[in-house]
Amino acid sequence: MASQGTIFALASGLGRAGIAVIRISGPAAGQALRQLAGRDDLPPPRKARRADFYDGDSSIDRGLCLWFPAPASFTGEDVAELHVHGGPAVIRAVCDALGRIPGLRPAEPGEFSRRAFQNNKMDLTEAEGLADLVDAETEAQRRQALRQMEGALGRLYETWRGGLVAVLARLEAELDFPDEGDVPQDKALASVMPVLAGLEIALATHLTDGARGERLRDGIQIAILGPPNAGKSSLLNALAKRDAAIVSAIAGTTRDVLECHLDLGGYPVVVADTAGLREAGDPIEAEGVRRAKARGAAADLKLIVVEAGGSLEGVAQLIDRNALVVINKTDLKQADLKLRGIDGAAPAIYPVSVKTGSGMPALIEGLTAEVRQRLESAAYHPAITRARHRAALEECRAAVDRALNGAAPELVAEDVRLAARAIGRITGRVDVEDVLDVVFREFCIGK
């Protein structure tokens, strides 16, 4: 991804719309704005001005223009915005005109945000929060992404990194100038141990969060399991409020895992319909049963669906603390099935009729409560949201643990330095060239 020259891109959504915003960033942004607006002067900073836009002598459109001189802009560079009518022909004409201006080129995905990072307008966690905010589909995802974009996660990590840098400075001062320090080396080492011990506890607590942040970002995994013809596919359709799965009276209709992304009470979930659990009659069904069991083992929550008046044969071993039991077809039979989970713990039981809708509100309420219990803290408190954060924090914690168990000041200082570098990679303070492309390629064009 090149970071030189002046770039432009459509910053609003594709397709027919009332308004489209085209963003220009770089040293030639002012020249481009003057040329398209047919005027020698620029608008007052951060104030919209009406403008007629031209491609040479040909009129393109009439709209608004804004000017954000460096460094008070999103990217930290000179930035111009053109607000034009959102028809595809207008957008194409404006972009074609910009492309003919020397020194301008179309932006690559995430290039505006990458320039903002490189110009210290945001750190990497804030950039990732911005990408998550653009992609947020539920209220809880929006809250988490907004907090991260506003710097909550970055401030936490920078506080920890600052503490490590202070410890490192103390140790290196005593190592480099042993005769000038006020405290002997052994006492200097002892004085920093409480700081490292406190950080180790904070890191351990942060890491043992049940992966709430990642689950909120990606969605809680819910698997629907049970014997054939219990109503699993019908339940998926009822939760999705559409015909997502084929429903048939023929047993074994579902052979593979069918996923459906849902917003459940403001929280993202991925509900998976699976093959009926029974002795398979052919190799294809056997593979479907294997995949169903594997999906159930990996799921955060399981909905065990059985028919009213039926049996638990083949599903009893699936009932644990992450399982909710759904007794379906209560419009045909009484839900008199007695269930016990592992170690005698009774699971939550929901008698329903997917066909009539009876009992469905209670099931959805109970399922939402289970999802909320697993995710709610992540939406309001800084949480680990990506695998690269977790890997760097694990590396940092390992280095802090080694430092706490070190005896020689030189080795302790080296481990503290490694810990500071590991956590600094999360926010982009050190040694991050290898992760920049991975971070910013997730962005859409124009962001």
Image: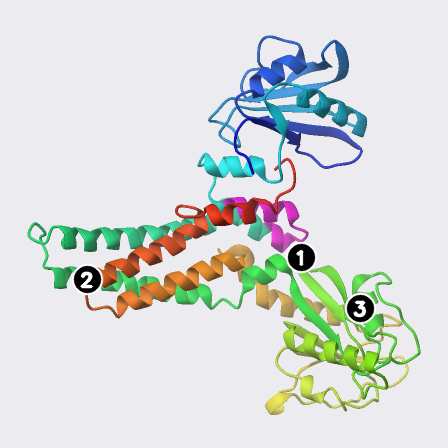
Magenta stretch: includes residue 192: no
What residue is disc 2 on? 409
Magenta stretch: includes residue 127: yes
* Amino acid on which the number 2 mark rests in the picture: Pro
Q: Are marks 2 and 1 in contact (CB under 8 Å)?
A: no
Given residues 402 and 315, the one toward you in this image is: 402
Q: Can residue 23 be seen at all in this image of the molecule? A: yes
Mark 2 and mark 3: span between their CA atoms?
60 Å
User: Which of the two discs, 2 and 1, labels the residue nearer the N terminus?
Assistant: 1
Q: Residue at x 26, y 51 (%)?
A: 166
Q: Secondary structure at mark 1?
A: loop
* Amino acid on which the number 1 mark rests in the picture: Gly
Tell me if residue 363 comes above or below residue 226 in the rendering. above
Q: Position of residue 402 (x, y in %)?
A: 30, 67
Mark 1 and mark 3: span between their CA atoms?
18 Å
Q: Secondary structure at mark 2?
A: helix
Mark 2 and mark 1: span between their CA atoms?
51 Å
Q: Position of residue 55 (x, y in %)?
A: 72, 15
- The range drawn in magenta is 125-142
What residue is disc 3 on? 236
